[in-house]
Image: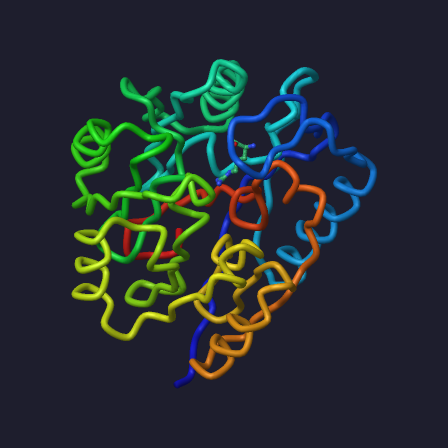
């Protein structure tokens, strides 16, 4: 099957102050050394790759004292030019919301609001065609799913995460195009797994190893799928399905429990169905 790319618009935050200073997910071990210059070099590689693929990339200034700020996906959800800014679960990350509110207001977005309930942005909300898939279980409060559905006027499908290693939806599932996803079944409760099988009978499913390599933390433009290079099984499966996988090395960000998708917030100007 031939796949087609659409031009995307992303917001990213350079990992200038990246570090693992606390632990709010099982991947974070503050005793392990981190190398900020390496994180920056790997991140620049990802940003340049997006530019080479023809996408637009905006940058929000990082703030000292916010070591997880590189994970831009958590800052907001943007659909149809409407912006629902995150309300973080952990106090360490709470000050990030103000930076996003300000950036969107200063950059021509008119309908900008901070979520009332705990809502970690595109970490847990993934736009898939005319619906939004929404995670809960570890970070985003399931009550926020209704708020999100009402704010955007797009149906939200709730999915429950059960494995603490896959604490955000974007660590367990990636949207490849409007009708195609890949996911790690074991990250979901039995009911959510059944729902995913029903909605996406042709989905790509990930092995334990590929999920642990953060292979599902991927960004797709409909044709190119950017994902951690260690997810070799998924890379082969994506190729079989007609996508063009592009493996990248974000080993430093992995120490904080994040990778490609976590570092990328999509700015959608058009309807939920268009690329924006
Ligand atoms: N250390 C960050 C946290 O635990 C990683 C966030 C990863 N972001 C994501 N969209 N999954 O909050």
- Position of residue 239 measured from the top left corner of the image (x, y, whole percent): 51, 80
Which residue is depicted at the point 33% across and 30% down?
140
Which residue is depicted at the point 60% across and 45% down?
57
Which residue is depicted at the point 27% across and 48% down?
133
Using the image as rendered, state which of residue 259 and residue 46 is in the foreground: 259
- Position of residue 120 measured from the top left corner of the image (x, y, whole percent): 40, 30
Using the image as rendered, state which of residue 57 and residue 63 is in the foreground: 63
Using the image as rendered, state which of residue 133 and residue 29 is in the foreground: 29
- Position of residue 256 measured from the top left corner of the image (x, y, whole percent): 62, 36
Position of residue 134 relative to residue 15, above or below, is below
Position of residue 168 relative to residue 235, above or below, is above
| Quadrant housing residue 152 | top left
Q: As drawn, is 17 to the left or to the right of 246?
A: right
Question: Quarter holding the N terminus?
Answer: bottom left
Q: As drawn, is 190 to the left or to the right of 250?
A: left
- Position of residue 86 measured from the top left corner of the image (x, y, whole percent): 40, 25
Q: As drawn, is 177 to the left or to the right of 100?
A: left
Total of numbered circles in the picture? 0
Using the image as rendered, state which of residue 262 and residue 102 is in the foreground: 262
Which residue is depicted at the point 28% across and 20% down?
117
Scheme of colours in the image: rainbow
Q: As drawn, is 165 to the left or to the right of 128?
A: right
């Amino acid at each position: 099957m031939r796949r087609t790319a659409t031009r995307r618009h992303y917001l990213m935050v350079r990992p200038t102050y990246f570090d693992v200073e606390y632990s709010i997910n099982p991947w974070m071990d503050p005793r392990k050394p981190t190398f900020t210059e390496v994180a920056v070099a790997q991140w620049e590689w990802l940003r340049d790759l997006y530019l080479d693929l023809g996408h637009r990339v905006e940058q929000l200034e990082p703030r000292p004292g916010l070591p997880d700020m590189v994970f831009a996906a958590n800052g907001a959800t943007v659909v149809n030019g409407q912006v629902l800014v995150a309300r973080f679960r952990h106090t360490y990350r709470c000050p990030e919301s103000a930076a996003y509110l300000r950036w969107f207001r200063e950059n021509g977005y008119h309908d900008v609001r901070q979520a009332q309930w705990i809502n970690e942005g595109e970490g847990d909300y993934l736009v898939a065609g005319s619906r939004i898939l929404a995670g809960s279980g570890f970070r985003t409060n399931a009550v926020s799913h209704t708020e999100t559905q009402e704010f955007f006027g797009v149906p939200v499908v709730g999915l429950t995460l059960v494995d603490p290693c896959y604490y955000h939806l974007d660590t367990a599932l990636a949207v490849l195009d409007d009708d195609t996803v890949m996911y790690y079944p074991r990250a979901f409760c039995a009911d959510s797994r059944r729902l995913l099988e029903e909605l996406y009978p042709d989905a790509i499913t990930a092995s334990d190893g590929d999920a642990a390599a953060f292979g599902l933390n991927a960004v797709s433009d409909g044709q190119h799928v950017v994902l951690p290079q260690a997810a070799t099984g998924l890379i082969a499966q994506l190729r079989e399905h007609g996508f063009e996988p592009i493996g990248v090395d974000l080993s430093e960000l992995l120490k904080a429990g994040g990778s490609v998708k976590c570092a990328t917030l999509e700015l959608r100007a058009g309807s939920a169905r268009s690329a924006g």
